[in-house]
Amino acid sequence: MCMDLKEVMARYPDAQTFKFGDSAALSAELLALVRSGQKKATCGALRYYPDGSPETPVVGRRDIALEWDDNPALVIETIDVSICRFCDVTADFALAEGENETLEGWREDHRRYFERNGGFDPEMELLCERFRLVEDLAVEG
């Protein structure tokens, strides 16, 4: 049984909530990759994070990843945040996202994702975040 979001927010009062992906299926797949330890990074178009946006990841902050139905799934802690152009993303970062086995596969999947979500440009800036899993909220403790 999952924990109630209010209870989780009380335990992590500075946390922001967010969802991985742009569909229920992709969200579930990405949450599973985090749970398995394969996914330790994520990125979004910098345009998603206007200056001063509370959703912008902050090193040391713990945030709550939600299931697609808004139930809390995981707590992660941001360990690094950087800005990088799409065309300059390294294989190391792409592989840390855990979704592909090659930089080329990462580029193709992310190009399609950004095309679906506001547009793609190879020169677009990405907010790149590395994180660690703090707590899996679906696990009884």
Image: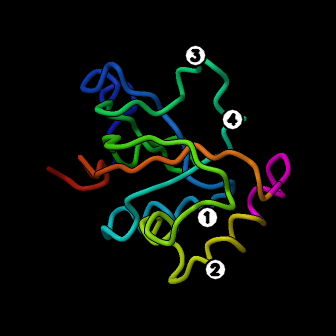
Who is closer to the viewer here, 7 or 65?
65
Tag 2: amino acid:
Gly
How far apart are labels 2 and 3 at the CA level?
A: 32 Å
Query: What residue sits right under mark 3 in the picture?
Result: 52
Q: Is residue 91 left or right of residue 62?
A: right
Q: Label 1 neighbourhood size at 10 Å, few (<14), some (14-19), many (20+)? A: few
Circle 1 SS class: helix
Which mark is first along the chain, 4 or 1?
1
How far apart are labels 1 and 4 at the CA level?
A: 19 Å
Circle 2 SS class: helix
* Callout in the foreground (2, 1): 2
Label at residue 48: 4
How far apart are labels 4 and 3 at the CA level?
A: 11 Å
How far apart are labels 2 and 4 at the CA level?
A: 23 Å
How far apart are labels 3 and 1 at the CA level?
A: 28 Å
Q: Is residue 103 left or right of residue 6?
A: right
Tag 3: amino acid:
Gly
Q: Position of residue 107 (x, y in %)?
A: 67, 71
Span shown in magenta: 112-121
Q: Label 4 neighbourhood size at 10 Å, few (<14), some (14-19), many (20+)? A: some
Residue sitting at the far top: 52
Query: What residue sits right under mark 1 in the picture?
Result: 26
Which mark is first along the chain, 3 or 2?
3
Label at residue 105: 2
Quarter of the image where one finds residue 24: bottom right
- Does the residue at mark 4 contact the one at mark 3 (Cβ under 8 Å)? no
Q: Position of residue 19 (x, y in %)?
A: 55, 45
* Callout in the foreground (1, 4): 4
Residue sitting at the far front: 88
Instruction: Say above or below: 103 vs 119.
Output: below
- Measuring 30% from the left and 48% from the top, which residue is drawn there? 137
